[in-house]
Image: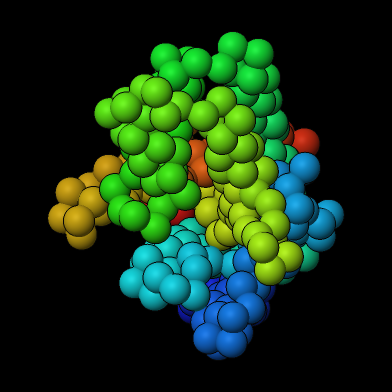
Amino acid sequence: MTDFRPGRFQVLPPIVKNLIIINVLMVLIQYVLGKYGIDLADYLGLHYWSSHYFRPWQLLTHMFMHGSYDDVNATILHIFSNMFALWMFGSILENVWGPKRFLTFYIICGLGAALCHLGVLTYDYHTIERAFDFYQNNATLDQYELFLKQHVPYPTALNEPEYPLWNLHQQWSNDPSTFNINGSKSVIYQYLHGGYNINHQYFKGIFDEATVGASGAVFGVLFAFGYLFPNTLLYLYFMIPIKAKWVVGAYALFELYAGFQNAHGDKIAHFAHIGGMIFAFILLKIWGKKVRNNFY
């Protein structure tokens, strides 16, 4: 039986406490540097293998980044939800396992989530690249429209990277005689890969988008809690009791659905969440932990 008596159970054990502190500090640093034109996510966020910004250390450092400096509300919501879940479920696991094993588990789940996410990006971006290669050999206004409909979300604001592509489509549709084959190829290439402006400053393409957040590791923590304590009652909206195993199962099914649905405009790394859960399951099987039904 796991000992949760007063004096033995720590409400905020050391690893969980320090992870929360580091994550909050990183958000503050990100915000301050952003005011000086430095986007910390360019250096520490996780980027696609072939991105201009990719560095190997990002597999680890992305776990300590949240949101962006220019969207404070979304950033606060992102870090609060992750840190609350880390405290709520991670504290139990650290008390059960001890600091060393919990930290090992957390980091491996985060790394596994990153690898799964990059694997999915590789498949998705390879598909887009093949479509672009096909378009370059069959460049017509109809094929341009088809490429946009299949691979480029329709923009909801003028500052979104998709806007120039759809704006040109509108212009060319209104007057097909103005359709420019080389111009269409160039605007798609820049949308995907970025490039340099007339001042020799690099601007980002979608392959340069950063993924940030501790969600992959936190989903691993959530899975482990549901695996070790499946019958523990959690209270939905603080009112409706539901067993932990059903909460974890529902999360997993939702992430699978959302990941395969892959709706345009969805910026959430669903397969990173699934990856965190998969690596959590593998670790739990390797460790052979049998602590179940002891915490209510």
The residue drawn where x is 83% and y is 54% is 56
Quarter occupied by residue 283? top right
Quarter occupied by residue 34? bottom right
Of the pair 78 and 295, the residue shown nearer to us: 78
Q: Position of residue 184 (x, y in %)?
A: 54, 31
Q: Is residue 187 visible?
A: yes
Q: Is residue 116 above or below residue 52?
A: above
Q: Position of residue 216 (x, y in %)?
A: 58, 49
Quarter occupied by residue 198? bottom right
The residue drawn where x is 77% and y is 42% is 50
Q: Residue furthest front?
A: 177
Asked whether, in this view, residue 74 is left or right of residue 204, the answer is left
The residue drawn where x is 77% and y is 36% is 286
Q: Is residue 104 visible?
A: no
Of the pair 266 and 143, the residue shown nearer to us: 143
Of the pair 48 and 173, the residue shown nearer to us: 173
Q: How many marks?
A: 0
The residue drawn where x is 39% and y is 75% is 72
Q: Position of residue 93 (x, y in %)?
A: 58, 58
Q: Residue furthest left?
A: 239
Coloring scheme used: rainbow
